Image (tube, rainbow, N blue to C red):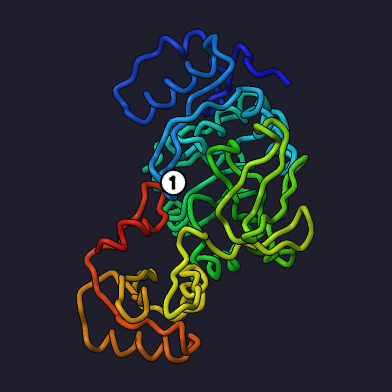
Amino acid sequence: MELFPSHITINGEAENIKELLHRKTNSEWEQTWLEFLAAWYNANDFIEVQTSGSTGTPKTITLKKDFVAASALRTIRFFELQEGDRVLHCLPSRYIAGKLMTVRALIGKLDLQLVDPASDFTHLPDDKPIRFAAMVINQVSKYLALPEQNIKNLLIGGSAIPKPLEEQLQQISTPCYSSYAMTETATHIALRKLNGSDKTESYQCLDDISVELDERECIRILMPGLENGAIQTNDFGELKDRHHFKLLGRIDNVIISGGIKFLPEQIEEKLAKEMPLPYAIGSVPDKHLGEKIILFVEGKADDEVKTIIQNHCILLLAKYEQPKEIRFIEKLPCTENGKIDRKRLKLT
Protein backbone atom coordinates (compact mmCIF):
# COMPACT_ATOMS: atom_id res chain seq x y z
CA MET A 1 0.00 0.00 0.00
CA GLU A 2 1.55 3.26 -1.18
CA LEU A 3 0.42 6.15 1.03
CA PHE A 4 2.07 8.95 -0.94
CA PRO A 5 2.04 8.26 -4.70
CA SER A 6 3.50 10.87 -7.03
CA HIS A 7 0.27 11.23 -9.03
CA ILE A 8 -3.47 11.16 -8.47
CA THR A 9 -6.12 10.75 -11.15
CA ILE A 10 -8.65 13.60 -11.06
CA ASN A 11 -11.63 13.59 -13.42
CA GLY A 12 -9.87 11.12 -15.72
CA GLU A 13 -6.53 12.95 -15.88
CA ALA A 14 -3.32 11.97 -14.07
CA GLU A 15 -2.22 14.95 -11.98
CA ASN A 16 1.28 15.46 -10.56
CA ILE A 17 1.06 15.87 -6.79
CA LYS A 18 3.90 18.40 -6.61
CA GLU A 19 2.14 20.60 -9.15
CA LEU A 20 -1.18 20.28 -7.33
CA LEU A 21 0.43 21.43 -4.09
CA HIS A 22 1.30 24.75 -5.78
CA ARG A 23 -2.05 25.20 -7.51
CA LYS A 24 -4.17 28.24 -6.67
CA THR A 25 -7.95 28.47 -6.87
CA ASN A 26 -10.68 30.95 -6.06
CA SER A 27 -13.09 28.17 -5.16
CA GLU A 28 -13.46 27.65 -1.42
CA TRP A 29 -14.31 23.95 -1.67
CA GLU A 30 -11.38 23.29 -4.03
CA GLN A 31 -9.04 25.24 -1.76
CA THR A 32 -10.12 23.11 1.21
CA TRP A 33 -9.38 19.99 -0.84
CA LEU A 34 -5.92 21.28 -1.82
CA GLU A 35 -5.19 22.12 1.82
CA PHE A 36 -5.96 18.58 2.85
CA LEU A 37 -3.78 17.21 0.06
CA ALA A 38 -0.91 19.36 1.39
CA ALA A 39 -1.55 18.09 4.92
CA TRP A 40 -1.46 14.48 3.71
CA TYR A 41 1.89 15.02 1.98
CA ASN A 42 3.59 17.07 4.71
CA ALA A 43 6.30 15.66 6.99
CA ASN A 44 3.95 14.81 9.87
CA ASP A 45 2.86 11.24 10.46
CA PHE A 46 -0.62 12.45 11.40
CA ILE A 47 -3.43 14.66 10.13
CA GLU A 48 -5.61 17.03 12.13
CA VAL A 49 -9.37 16.55 11.84
CA GLN A 50 -12.35 18.35 13.30
CA THR A 51 -15.17 16.44 14.94
CA SER A 52 -18.66 17.32 13.75
CA GLY A 53 -19.98 18.52 17.11
CA SER A 54 -23.14 16.45 16.74
CA THR A 55 -22.75 14.97 20.23
CA GLY A 56 -20.61 17.61 21.92
CA THR A 57 -18.42 20.62 21.37
CA PRO A 58 -16.50 20.39 18.05
CA LYS A 59 -12.83 19.78 18.63
CA THR A 60 -9.66 19.11 16.68
CA ILE A 61 -8.02 15.71 17.08
CA THR A 62 -5.08 13.99 15.42
CA LEU A 63 -5.13 10.69 13.54
CA LYS A 64 -2.07 8.78 12.39
CA LYS A 65 -1.83 8.61 8.61
CA ASP A 66 -1.35 4.86 8.57
CA PHE A 67 -4.53 4.50 10.70
CA VAL A 68 -6.44 6.64 8.19
CA ALA A 69 -5.00 4.64 5.28
CA ALA A 70 -6.08 1.36 6.94
CA SER A 71 -9.66 2.70 7.09
CA ALA A 72 -9.50 3.65 3.41
CA LEU A 73 -8.23 0.19 2.52
CA ARG A 74 -11.12 -1.49 4.38
CA THR A 75 -13.60 0.42 2.24
CA ILE A 76 -11.71 -0.42 -0.95
CA ARG A 77 -11.80 -4.11 -0.04
CA PHE A 78 -15.46 -4.14 1.01
CA PHE A 79 -16.65 -2.54 -2.23
CA GLU A 80 -14.07 -4.45 -4.31
CA LEU A 81 -12.73 -1.29 -5.94
CA GLN A 82 -10.06 -1.78 -8.57
CA GLU A 83 -7.32 0.49 -9.94
CA GLY A 84 -8.86 3.00 -12.38
CA ASP A 85 -12.39 2.73 -10.97
CA ARG A 86 -14.18 6.06 -10.84
CA VAL A 87 -15.25 7.28 -7.39
CA LEU A 88 -17.24 10.43 -6.65
CA HIS A 89 -15.91 12.98 -4.15
CA CYS A 90 -18.78 15.34 -3.26
CA LEU A 91 -18.19 15.87 0.47
CA PRO A 92 -16.52 18.83 2.24
CA SER A 93 -12.82 18.09 2.68
CA ARG A 94 -12.61 19.78 6.07
CA TYR A 95 -14.33 16.76 7.64
CA ILE A 96 -13.05 13.21 7.85
CA ALA A 97 -15.54 11.71 5.36
CA GLY A 98 -14.32 14.06 2.63
CA LYS A 99 -10.67 13.50 3.50
CA LEU A 100 -11.10 9.73 3.24
CA MET A 101 -12.41 9.93 -0.32
CA THR A 102 -9.11 11.46 -1.35
CA VAL A 103 -7.06 8.92 0.62
CA ARG A 104 -8.99 6.06 -1.00
CA ALA A 105 -8.23 7.48 -4.44
CA LEU A 106 -4.53 7.82 -3.59
CA ILE A 107 -3.87 4.38 -2.16
CA GLY A 108 -6.30 2.57 -4.47
CA LYS A 109 -5.14 4.42 -7.62
CA LEU A 110 -8.77 5.33 -8.29
CA ASP A 111 -10.18 7.97 -10.66
CA LEU A 112 -11.44 10.71 -8.33
CA GLN A 113 -14.43 12.58 -9.77
CA LEU A 114 -14.10 15.80 -7.81
CA VAL A 115 -17.22 18.01 -7.59
CA ASP A 116 -18.55 20.87 -5.50
CA PRO A 117 -20.38 19.48 -2.41
CA ALA A 118 -23.27 21.79 -3.33
CA SER A 119 -23.59 20.11 -6.75
CA ASP A 120 -26.97 18.84 -7.95
CA PHE A 121 -25.13 16.07 -9.87
CA THR A 122 -26.72 17.01 -13.20
CA HIS A 123 -23.35 17.49 -14.90
CA LEU A 124 -21.61 14.27 -13.97
CA PRO A 125 -19.92 12.63 -16.98
CA ASP A 126 -21.58 9.46 -18.20
CA ASP A 127 -18.73 7.92 -20.19
CA LYS A 128 -18.15 5.32 -17.46
CA PRO A 129 -19.99 4.40 -14.27
CA ILE A 130 -19.14 5.70 -10.83
CA ARG A 131 -18.17 2.62 -8.86
CA PHE A 132 -18.48 4.23 -5.44
CA ALA A 133 -19.81 7.44 -3.87
CA ALA A 134 -20.49 8.71 -0.36
CA MET A 135 -23.22 11.27 0.32
CA VAL A 136 -25.18 12.88 3.14
CA ILE A 137 -28.99 12.85 3.23
CA ASN A 138 -29.72 16.06 1.32
CA GLN A 139 -27.33 15.01 -1.47
CA VAL A 140 -29.07 11.64 -1.81
CA SER A 141 -32.36 13.44 -2.41
CA LYS A 142 -30.73 15.40 -5.25
CA TYR A 143 -29.27 12.19 -6.69
CA LEU A 144 -32.63 10.42 -6.62
CA ALA A 145 -34.17 13.33 -8.54
CA LEU A 146 -31.93 12.59 -11.56
CA PRO A 147 -33.54 10.81 -14.56
CA GLU A 148 -30.94 8.04 -14.28
CA GLN A 149 -28.66 6.84 -11.49
CA ASN A 150 -25.11 6.02 -12.57
CA ILE A 151 -23.57 5.02 -9.23
CA LYS A 152 -22.83 1.35 -8.59
CA ASN A 153 -22.44 1.59 -4.78
CA LEU A 154 -23.75 4.44 -2.62
CA LEU A 155 -22.71 5.01 0.98
CA ILE A 156 -25.01 7.29 3.02
CA GLY A 157 -23.80 8.89 6.23
CA GLY A 158 -23.90 11.92 8.47
CA SER A 159 -27.19 11.10 10.18
CA ALA A 160 -29.85 8.44 10.57
CA ILE A 161 -31.66 7.50 7.35
CA PRO A 162 -35.26 8.80 7.38
CA LYS A 163 -37.81 6.06 6.76
CA PRO A 164 -39.38 7.81 3.73
CA LEU A 165 -35.93 8.04 2.11
CA GLU A 166 -35.19 4.40 2.88
CA GLU A 167 -38.45 3.49 1.15
CA GLN A 168 -37.42 5.53 -1.91
CA LEU A 169 -34.16 3.60 -2.07
CA GLN A 170 -36.11 0.38 -2.60
CA GLN A 171 -37.07 1.70 -6.04
CA ILE A 172 -33.52 1.98 -7.41
CA SER A 173 -31.02 -0.69 -8.39
CA THR A 174 -27.99 1.11 -6.87
CA PRO A 175 -26.90 -0.86 -3.77
CA CYS A 176 -27.12 1.61 -0.86
CA TYR A 177 -25.48 1.38 2.55
CA SER A 178 -25.87 3.24 5.82
CA SER A 179 -22.61 3.89 7.64
CA TYR A 180 -21.83 3.73 11.35
CA ALA A 181 -18.96 6.15 11.63
CA MET A 182 -17.18 8.76 13.69
CA THR A 183 -14.20 11.03 13.25
CA GLU A 184 -12.17 9.18 15.89
CA THR A 185 -12.35 5.93 13.88
CA ALA A 186 -11.51 7.63 10.55
CA THR A 187 -15.06 7.22 9.20
CA HIS A 188 -17.15 4.07 9.11
CA ILE A 189 -16.40 0.93 11.08
CA ALA A 190 -19.62 -0.84 10.03
CA LEU A 191 -22.18 -0.79 7.21
CA ARG A 192 -25.85 -1.72 6.82
CA LYS A 193 -27.40 -2.66 3.46
CA LEU A 194 -30.47 -0.48 2.93
CA ASN A 195 -32.09 -1.93 -0.19
CA GLY A 196 -32.26 -4.99 -2.38
CA SER A 197 -33.11 -8.57 -1.47
CA ASP A 198 -30.13 -8.71 0.91
CA LYS A 199 -30.97 -5.58 2.93
CA THR A 200 -30.43 -5.92 6.66
CA GLU A 201 -31.51 -4.40 9.97
CA SER A 202 -28.05 -4.88 11.50
CA TYR A 203 -24.71 -3.22 10.86
CA GLN A 204 -21.82 -5.43 9.78
CA CYS A 205 -18.34 -4.55 11.06
CA LEU A 206 -15.55 -4.18 8.51
CA ASP A 207 -12.27 -6.11 8.55
CA ASP A 208 -10.42 -6.42 11.89
CA ILE A 209 -13.20 -4.60 13.78
CA SER A 210 -15.55 -5.94 16.44
CA VAL A 211 -17.94 -4.50 19.02
CA GLU A 212 -19.13 -5.24 22.53
CA LEU A 213 -21.51 -3.63 25.02
CA ASP A 214 -20.52 -1.96 28.27
CA GLU A 215 -22.54 -2.11 31.50
CA ARG A 216 -24.85 0.63 30.16
CA GLU A 217 -25.47 -1.45 27.00
CA CYS A 218 -23.55 1.11 24.94
CA ILE A 219 -21.32 0.07 22.04
CA ARG A 220 -17.58 -0.28 22.54
CA ILE A 221 -15.51 -0.48 19.34
CA LEU A 222 -12.41 -2.65 19.15
CA MET A 223 -10.08 -2.05 16.24
CA PRO A 224 -6.34 -1.88 15.46
CA GLY A 225 -4.71 1.52 15.77
CA LEU A 226 -6.88 2.89 18.58
CA GLU A 227 -5.41 3.86 21.92
CA ASN A 228 -5.91 0.79 24.17
CA GLY A 229 -7.37 -0.90 21.10
CA ALA A 230 -10.89 0.36 21.82
CA ILE A 231 -13.16 3.39 21.86
CA GLN A 232 -16.23 3.78 24.05
CA THR A 233 -19.38 5.28 22.53
CA ASN A 234 -22.63 6.52 24.05
CA ASP A 235 -24.71 4.65 21.48
CA PHE A 236 -27.17 2.12 22.83
CA GLY A 237 -26.77 -1.12 20.90
CA GLU A 238 -28.16 -4.60 20.52
CA LEU A 239 -25.63 -7.27 19.52
CA LYS A 240 -26.34 -10.20 17.25
CA ASP A 241 -22.69 -11.19 17.66
CA ARG A 242 -19.36 -9.35 17.92
CA HIS A 243 -19.52 -8.32 14.28
CA HIS A 244 -23.24 -7.50 13.82
CA PHE A 245 -25.31 -5.02 15.82
CA LYS A 246 -28.33 -2.72 15.82
CA LEU A 247 -28.34 0.94 16.86
CA LEU A 248 -31.07 1.95 19.30
CA GLY A 249 -30.20 5.57 20.13
CA ARG A 250 -27.83 7.69 22.20
CA ILE A 251 -27.59 7.69 25.97
CA ASP A 252 -27.06 11.47 25.80
CA ASN A 253 -30.54 11.87 24.34
CA VAL A 254 -32.45 9.79 26.90
CA ILE A 255 -35.58 11.49 28.20
CA ILE A 256 -36.66 10.48 31.71
CA SER A 257 -40.34 11.29 32.07
CA GLY A 258 -42.36 10.08 35.05
CA GLY A 259 -39.46 7.79 35.98
CA ILE A 260 -39.50 6.02 32.58
CA LYS A 261 -36.59 6.23 30.12
CA PHE A 262 -37.41 7.07 26.50
CA LEU A 263 -35.11 7.17 23.48
CA PRO A 264 -36.27 9.97 21.13
CA GLU A 265 -34.79 8.15 18.14
CA GLN A 266 -37.09 5.17 18.72
CA ILE A 267 -40.19 7.35 19.05
CA GLU A 268 -39.21 9.25 15.89
CA GLU A 269 -38.82 5.98 13.99
CA LYS A 270 -42.34 4.89 14.95
CA LEU A 271 -43.72 8.15 13.53
CA ALA A 272 -41.54 8.16 10.42
CA LYS A 273 -44.03 6.94 7.81
CA GLU A 274 -46.94 9.17 8.72
CA MET A 275 -45.58 12.62 9.54
CA PRO A 276 -46.52 15.35 7.03
CA LEU A 277 -43.72 17.72 8.11
CA PRO A 278 -40.13 17.45 9.41
CA TYR A 279 -40.14 16.73 13.15
CA ALA A 280 -38.08 15.73 16.16
CA ILE A 281 -38.78 14.41 19.64
CA GLY A 282 -37.41 16.48 22.51
CA SER A 283 -38.29 17.42 26.05
CA VAL A 284 -38.64 20.33 28.45
CA PRO A 285 -38.40 20.37 32.25
CA ASP A 286 -41.64 19.57 34.08
CA LYS A 287 -42.23 19.85 37.83
CA HIS A 288 -44.41 16.73 37.91
CA LEU A 289 -42.75 14.43 35.36
CA GLY A 290 -39.14 15.65 35.57
CA GLU A 291 -39.19 16.01 31.77
CA LYS A 292 -42.15 16.03 29.46
CA ILE A 293 -42.00 14.74 25.90
CA ILE A 294 -42.44 17.40 23.22
CA LEU A 295 -42.98 16.79 19.51
CA PHE A 296 -41.29 19.65 17.65
CA VAL A 297 -42.67 20.17 14.14
CA GLU A 298 -41.03 22.34 11.49
CA GLY A 299 -43.57 24.70 9.98
CA LYS A 300 -46.27 27.25 10.74
CA ALA A 301 -48.83 26.41 13.41
CA ASP A 302 -51.90 24.89 11.79
CA ASP A 303 -54.83 23.39 13.71
CA GLU A 304 -55.74 20.96 10.93
CA VAL A 305 -52.18 19.66 10.61
CA LYS A 306 -51.91 19.47 14.41
CA THR A 307 -55.02 17.28 14.55
CA ILE A 308 -53.60 14.97 11.88
CA ILE A 309 -50.35 14.66 13.83
CA GLN A 310 -52.18 14.00 17.10
CA ASN A 311 -54.12 11.19 15.46
CA HIS A 312 -50.90 9.68 14.08
CA CYS A 313 -49.37 9.77 17.55
CA ILE A 314 -52.39 8.06 19.10
CA LEU A 315 -52.30 5.37 16.43
CA LEU A 316 -48.55 4.74 16.35
CA LEU A 317 -47.21 5.38 19.85
CA ALA A 318 -47.65 3.61 23.17
CA LYS A 319 -49.53 5.38 25.95
CA TYR A 320 -46.49 6.77 27.76
CA GLU A 321 -44.71 7.74 24.52
CA GLN A 322 -47.46 10.22 23.59
CA PRO A 323 -46.07 13.77 23.39
CA LYS A 324 -47.51 16.06 26.04
CA GLU A 325 -47.32 18.94 23.61
CA ILE A 326 -46.92 19.54 19.87
CA ARG A 327 -44.83 22.64 19.27
CA PHE A 328 -44.43 24.21 15.82
CA ILE A 329 -41.11 25.96 15.15
CA GLU A 330 -39.73 27.76 12.12
CA LYS A 331 -36.73 25.47 11.63
CA LEU A 332 -35.47 22.36 13.37
CA PRO A 333 -31.93 23.02 14.65
CA CYS A 334 -29.39 20.82 12.86
CA THR A 335 -25.65 20.34 12.90
CA GLU A 336 -23.71 21.00 9.69
CA ASN A 337 -23.86 17.35 8.70
CA GLY A 338 -27.64 17.23 8.99
CA LYS A 339 -28.20 15.63 12.40
CA ILE A 340 -30.80 17.07 14.76
CA ASP A 341 -29.00 19.31 17.26
CA ARG A 342 -30.78 18.07 20.37
CA LYS A 343 -28.99 20.45 22.74
CA ARG A 344 -30.29 23.46 20.80
CA LEU A 345 -33.68 21.77 20.52
CA LYS A 346 -33.97 21.84 24.33
CA LEU A 347 -33.52 25.61 24.22
CA THR A 348 -36.22 26.11 21.58
Query: Could you classify mark 1 by the number of other residues whose Cα lies within 10 Å: few (under 14), some (14-19), or many (20 or more)?
Result: some
Is 52 displayed left or right of 63 in the figure?
left
- At mark 1, the secondary structure is loop
Is 303 displayed left or right of 54 in the figure?
left
Residue 60 x, y percent position in the rendering: 44, 30
Q: Nearer the viewer, residue 82 or 190?
A: 190
Q: Nearer the viewer, residue 92 or 262?
A: 262
Mark yes or no: residue 81 visible. no
Q: Residue at x 37, y 59 (%)?
A: 342
Mark yes or no: residue 118 visible. yes
Indicate whether 198 appears above or below 95: below
Image quarter of residue 177: bottom right
Q: Residue at x 37, y 23 (%)?
A: 31
Indicate whether 112 appears above or below 167: above
The N terminus is located in which quarter?
top right
Residue 153 x, y percent position in the rendering: 64, 49
Q: Nearer the viewer, residue 56 or 163?
A: 56
Is 333 displayed left or right of 207 in the figure?
left
Residue 161 x, y percent position in the rendering: 52, 61
What residue is pinned by disc 1?
A: 121
